[in-house]
Image (spheres, rainbow, N blue to C red):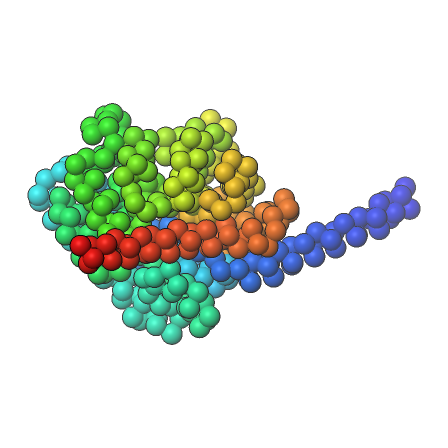
Amino acid sequence: MLKTRLLHFMLAIPLLLQAQVDRLQSLKVHRSLLTIDTHCDTPLRLSDPAWDISVRHQGGDRAGGKVDLPRMADGNLDASFFAVFVGQRPLTQENYQLARAKADALLGQVHGVILDHGERVSLATHSQHARDNEAMGKLSIYIGLENGFPLAEEVSAIGRYYQQGVRYITLCHSTHNQVCDSSTDPLGAVYHGLSAFGEKAVREMNRLGMIVDVSHASDETFYDVVELSSAPIIASHSCCRALCDHPRNLSDDMIRKLAEKGGVLQMCILSDYVVPRSTGRRASVRDVVDHIDHVVALVGEEYVGIGTDFDGGGGVIDCNDVSELPNLTYEMMRRGYSEQTLRKIWGENFLRVFSRVEANAAVELKGRSDE
């Protein structure tokens, strides 16, 4: 019996060593990639004077959050979109003013982090900046505005946010606003897509070179944006409805339309959008990669990326905070994804969209100057 057990153990050693080599190899590959997360809600933590982004916090600790500068380095996250999130309130002038004040305060705090830690991070406002900063050994912070509510009904507000570094706007959040219908408002459709102001907002974002983000938007809003936008669009943190039937996720037809537009679906890792609640279990990295597999099989490897929603509910088994992002790379490599494909998923696909949005704005500007 002892000899049999010893033989089994000896036979298992090569497999164990191979698994270890695979893990080490995947980490080496991960560290060679330019990695971009298009959505995290870490700015909400900056309002807490006791929380310091430059300090390593305990992984999985709710008080410590999911993202800080040391753990970004641990997870080899080169660039992150910090989402300036403003919750929805009734559409009154007073609430518009409050929303704008909240957005401005959060923007100030994000800029404060960059100013205080300039030796480690830089503000990024152009598609090339992620590459430039990575080459200098710096982390990149991009800024997105989550919820168009602070725009009030002023198209000019979009330009003001652009000047403050905002490079995408998530049109709405969990309920309708003045821009469009949300995918999760229990009251049902108000505009059946974009409002009249929402149409103006999309055109202005195209003009400025600001990315339009359709995560949280209703299906009708999505199709309106696809039809109206002169530039590719993104879903900064969404998943596939075919695998998890949630209105926040994109149907196969929506994913096809997004790809036809040249856009990208940035995969969210918030459990409720990855596996149905009815399963009674928390999602894992394998479940997340199932969604990536689905997009690749449906439209190709050029139309999917990563948008974790860390600090906004994001986090799954084996990828509970930013330091564990290499586990996503490991799982994709385990399934046979090439290094070239990983480069696309981790950053190149999104940067392609970003650069096309910038180029589209330049063409529109030239067209106006030639008139």
Residue visible at 46% across and 48% down?
305
**Pick the front one: 216 or 87:** 216
Q: Is residue 289 visible?
A: yes
Q: Is residue 64 placed above or below 298 in the rendered structure?
A: below
Q: Is residue 210 placed above or below 246 in the rendered structure?
A: below
Q: Is residue 268 placed above or below 38 in the rendered structure?
A: above
- Looking at the picture, how far across and down is residue 143, in whole percent? 31, 56
- Looking at the picture, how far across and down is residue 269, in whole percent? 45, 43
Classify residue 265 by image quadrant.
top left
Residue visible at 33% across and 31% down?
219
- Looking at the picture, how far across and down is residue 71, in whole percent? 46, 61
In the picture, the quarter occupied by the N terminus is top right
Left or right of residue 281, residue 48 in this image: left
- Looking at the picture, how far across and down is residue 161, in whole percent? 21, 56
Report the number of discs: 0
**Pick the front one: 127 or 370:** 370
| Residue most extreme to the front | 371
